[in-house]
Amino acid sequence: MDTPTARQHTEDEAVRSLVAVAHARRLLPEPAAARRIRLAARVTLDEVARVVGVTKSTVSRYEHGLRMPTDEHAAAWRTALEQLAQITGLVALLPEAEVSRRGAAG
């Protein structure tokens, strides 16, 4: 039987996990921007899918806004897009990742 303390701990873990997923997803570009970055880099859906650890149809769904990456894939998707944006000069399509930190520091 769950004790109130154990239940609260489980709820706290669930909330922390949810916040981590939300944070990771907020760092992703809009779906159309993600597709634009990939196409500009001349990288296939298969190539990106292998790096992210999903299928090419899943990457296509990300790029068309039909699906959001899970917490385990969001970081890999973001990293791949950051690197591709760097080599294509499309960094401006990425959301500001450090706005709150810069605002707090400056």
Image: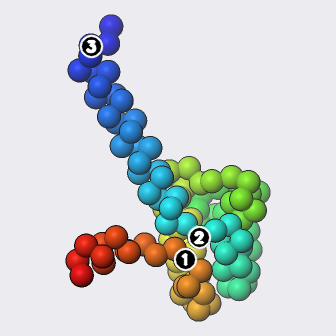
Q: Which residue does the numbered mark 2 point to in the structure image?
A: 29
Q: Are marks 2 and 1 in contact (CB under 8 Å)?
A: yes
Q: Which mark is residue 3?
A: 3
Q: Give the secondary structure at mark 2.
A: loop
Residue positioned 73% across, 54% down in the render: 66
Please indicate, yes or no, whether residue 43 appears anywhere in the rendered image: no
Q: Quadrant of the N terminus?
A: top left
Amino acid beneath label 3:
Thr
Q: Amino acid at mark 2?
A: Pro
Compared across the picture, whether 51 is left or right of 32 comes to: left
Q: Secondary structure at mark 1?
A: loop
Which comes before the other along the chain, label 3 or label 2?
Answer: 3
Q: Residue at x 59, y 92 (%)?
A: 89
| Left or right of 37, for residue 19 | left
**Cα distance in 3D space between marks 2 and 1:** 5 Å
Return the residue at label 1: 94
Q: Residues within 10 Å of mark 3 (few under 14, many from 20)?
A: few
* Coordinates of residue 52 in the picture (x, y in percent): 58, 62
